[in-house]
Image (cartoon, helix red, strand yellow):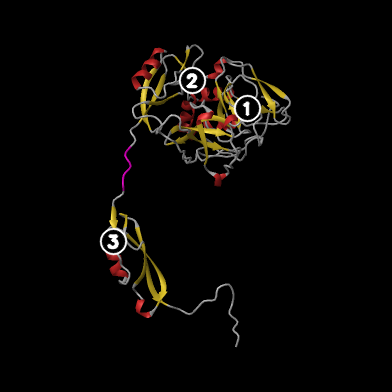
Amino acid sequence: MPGFRTFTLRTAGAFLAFAIVLGSVTGLACVARTVAAEAVGYLAEDAFFTGALGDGLNLGRNLTDKGGSRKGSEQGLYGGSAAIDVCDPDLLIDFLLLAGNGKKKAAWAKALGVGAKNKNVRKFVKSLTEVVLANDTLVANHGYKKGRAHRYDAVLEAGTAVLVDVFGVPRVKCNCGNPLAVSEHEPGDVKVEFKGKGKGNKEWKVKKDQVVRVEKAEQPQKSLTVVDVKDPDEQVEIDLPEDPDLTGGGDGENSESPSAELVEIPQTRGLSVADATQQLEAVGLVVETRTVDDPDVSAGLVAGTEPEGGGTAAVGSTVTLLVAAETPEPTVPETVTVPSVVGLSQAQAEQEVNVAGLVSAVSTAPASAEQVGLVIQQEPTGGEAAAGSTVTLVVGVESVGEEFIGGTDTGTG
């Protein structure tokens, strides 16, 4: 996309550990779902690749005050400029095609519903267009853990650089390479939570009525009209790829070859496995299942699919039903009585603590001559404690001369 740039990504690193912990609220449907809030420039530790860049432009505000669900063909969703660079898709391709990144590439491709062979990944990335979000935007983000992409919902701050597909939907977060999809929730039904503040996730004021969720346009778009972030009163027209085959892969389990008939994957979240299977098979898809943890869906019901509902897949390709697992009952730790050992020798005290099923930790403190070698203090002092927890014992030692803190004693006589 010549002439439309914000920054160029120069380096790429390895996958980091999945570390975002998302809160969620279960129970009544009217209770808001907690989602992650990710600020401009925040590089989460579940990144698909890392690089020495920030995000494009910190707009400081939404460029439109119209929130809610919007079609990807609408104006006002994205920003750009005729003079700056947004991200480097070629570096993303290079990272995904590295010989040692096969599992990561497969997870990345599966989350996006494209074939995992190198030519499919390259073709898909080339089909995307680089922009910046003009509004705080609710998306389904993906982290990586144990060889799989794990979905979580997030609100990305206005100014975040993304790659969008020909339907106008954000598909990749530029500063980390994470796959993106359409969230299954409405912006008004979510509550944001800031994690990773110590790692650059700066808190900003999220106005829920201005958060947007971008849905797939009715048909592929030939261009997008974006807001000029250097001059919000002006607009820039961006041409999108014309080859329809660029919207999918060419082979692989979930590929979309030029000759294959494409169907829309039904939304199945909350359905029984039988009902979801019936809907998927009715449009010509092959169904397999996998158990996942999802506290917001009752055990045994469908939490979603891979590839995700709302996307497309070739007739005869496989879609995985993600079935919510049983939530284990929380285990209540065994409690034991903490013995009182003050006045005992260190050896006796440690023995009594250990016999009670606890662990002793010893420190010392100056004490009178008769208290040397004895326990003069303990914490906790008694009551009940979890088995295996620590009891701190303070043992008296011989007192030494007074120390002067903060300077040298020069004396007065």
Tags 1 and 2 in contact by the CB under 8 Å rule? no
Residue 144 location (% of width, % of height): 46, 35
The mark found on residue 354 in the picture is 3
Label 3 sits on a secondary structure element that is helix
**Front one among 112 and 301:** 301
198 is higher (above) or lower (below) than 385: above
Judged from this view, the residue extending furthest toward the left is 355
Gap between marks 3 and 1, in whole Å? 62 Å
* Main SS class of the magenta portion in the image: loop
Would you name the residue on which mark 2 appears?
A: 310
Label 2 sits on a secondary structure element that is loop
Judged from this view, the residue extending furthest toward the bottom is 413
Residue 412 location (% of width, % of height): 60, 85
Q: Nearer the viewer, mark 3 or mark 1?
A: 3
Would you name the residue on which mark 1 appears?
A: 130
The mark found on residue 325 in the picture is none
Quarter of the view holding residue 296: top left
Alpha-carbon neighbours of circle 3 within 10 Å: few (<14), some, or many (≥20)?
A: some
Magenta span: 328-332
63 is higher (above) or lower (below) than 52: above
